Image (tube, helix red, strand yellow):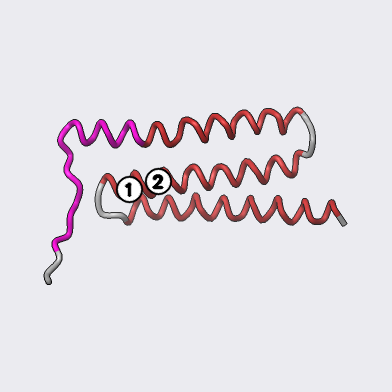
Amino acid sequence: MMEMLVYIASWTCLLLGSGFCLIGGIGLLRLPDFYSRMHGGGITDTLGAGLVILGLMLQGGLSLVTVKLVMILLFLLLTSPVATHAIARAAQHSGLKPHVVEDGA
């Protein structure tokens, strides 16, 4: 019974993570400007990859593979937001302005 719950939880994490990565890819194509794309890609990348790695950890059980996946997850959670922030700051510093929609009212 417990094995079935872990199996279902791992596949749920894998499918949700894949869905978030797919949504992030669509967002990179559809969002209007650089900063929106950075936001959409950065958040869905971290969440999607985190869920995929969590699903893989559940399938791996208690093993050396799980320890390696935990280290990869920690590295991803530390570096992805920092890299996204650094790229956005560099774009702002170089003079790239965000797309602003004026309200007609």
Q: Is residue 43 magenta?
A: no
Q: Position of residue 9 (x, y in %)?
A: 71, 54
Q: Position of residue 1 (x, y in %)?
A: 87, 57
Q: Is residue 5 shown left or right of residue 28?
A: right
Do tag 1 and tag 2 residues touch (Cβ < 8 Å)?
yes
Q: Is residue 93 shown left or right of residue 73?
A: left
Q: Amino acid at mark 2?
A: Gly
> Callout 1: helix, strand or loop?
helix
Q: Say which of 87 and 14 sits in front.
A: 87
- Estimate the spatial distance between the alpha carbons at disc 1 and disc 2, rounded to whole Å: 6 Å
- Residue 67 vs 52, above or below: the answer is above
> Callout 2: helix, strand or loop?
helix
- The residue drawn where x is 53% and y is 55% is 19
Q: Is residue 100 shown left or right of residue 19?
A: left
- Find the magenta span and give its range: 85-102
Q: Position of residue 60 (x, y in %)?
A: 75, 39
Q: Which of the numbered marks, if any, corresponds to residue 37?
A: 1
- The residue drawn where x is 65% and y is 43% is 54
Question: Local crowd at mark 1 within 10 Å, few (<14), some, or many (≥20)?
Answer: some
Asked which quadrant contains residue 27, the reply is bottom left
Quadrant occupied by the C terminus = bottom left
Considering every residue shown, the one lying at the far bottom of the view is 105
- Residue 5 vs 105, above or below: the answer is above
- The residue drawn where x is 82% and y is 56% is 4
Q: Please give the residue where the numbered disc 2 appears in the rendered image.
A: 41
Question: Local crowd at mark 2 within 10 Å, few (<14), some, or many (≥20)?
Answer: many
